[in-house]
């Protein structure tokens, strides 16, 4: 089992910056791709950014050039630097990881998707 915990959300004025972090813990064997998603009120879940184990990144068009995703593979952490924030960036942001872990019998578990609890980002105009 893998646990993901996000932090760093908050209230910021438009044009400001925030940095989100996600820490993965548990009996982790390896983490493959990691993602940031967000969900605004009454809207569908949206993929914001992704990063592979090799460091290849991809961004939603709406955040490209403003957000930067990064990860520390050794520490099993994921970050999202958000600059030039806009009111439309307001949402709950979720960390997601595709990971392999060990079960209670020290056996490899099949690769699974894990989610954090989310952190609120509010951008005021």
Image: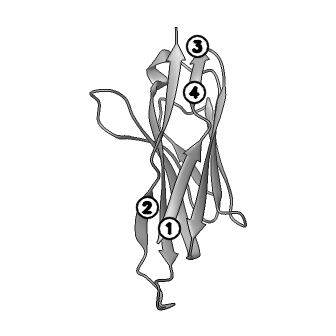
- Secondary element under disc 3, as helix, strand or loop, is loop
Circle 4 residues within 10 Å: few <14, some 14–19, many ≥20: some
Are the residues tagged 1 and 4 within 8 Å (C-beta)?
no
- Judge left or right: residue 25 versus residue 113: right
Circle 1 residues within 10 Å: few <14, some 14–19, many ≥20: many
Whole-percent x and y of residue 113? 41, 64
Q: Relative to 39, is 123 above or below?
A: above
Are the residues tagged 2 and 1 within 8 Å (C-beta)?
yes
Q: CA distance from mark 3 to mark 2?
A: 31 Å
Q: Relative to 51, is 6 above or below?
A: above
Disc on the earlier residue, 1 or 4: 1
The label number, if any, that marks residue 14 in the structure image: 3
Q: Which residue is mark 1?
A: 2
Q: CA distance from mark 2 to mark 4?
A: 23 Å
Q: Which residue is mark 2?
A: 114
Which mark is in front, 3 or 2? 2
Disc on the earlier residue, 2 or 4: 4
Circle 2 residues within 10 Å: few <14, some 14–19, many ≥20: some
- Secondary element under disc 2, as helix, strand or loop, is strand
């Amino acid at each position: 089992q893998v646990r993901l915990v996000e932090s760093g959300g908050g209230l910021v004025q438009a044009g400001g910056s925030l940095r989100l972090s996600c820490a993965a813990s548990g009996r982790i064997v390896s983490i493959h791709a990691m993602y940031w998603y967000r969900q605004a009120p009454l809207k569908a879940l949206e993929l914001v950014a992704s990063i592979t184990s090799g460091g290849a990144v991809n961004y939603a068009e709406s955040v490209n050039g403003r957000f930067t995703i990064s990860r520390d593979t050794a520490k099993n952490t994921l970050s999202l630097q958000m600059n030039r924030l806009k009111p439309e960036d307001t949402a709950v942001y979720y960390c997601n990881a595709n990971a392999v872990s060990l079960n209670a019998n020290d056996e490899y578990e099949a690769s699974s998707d894990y989610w954090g609890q989310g952190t609120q980002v509010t951008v005021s105009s």
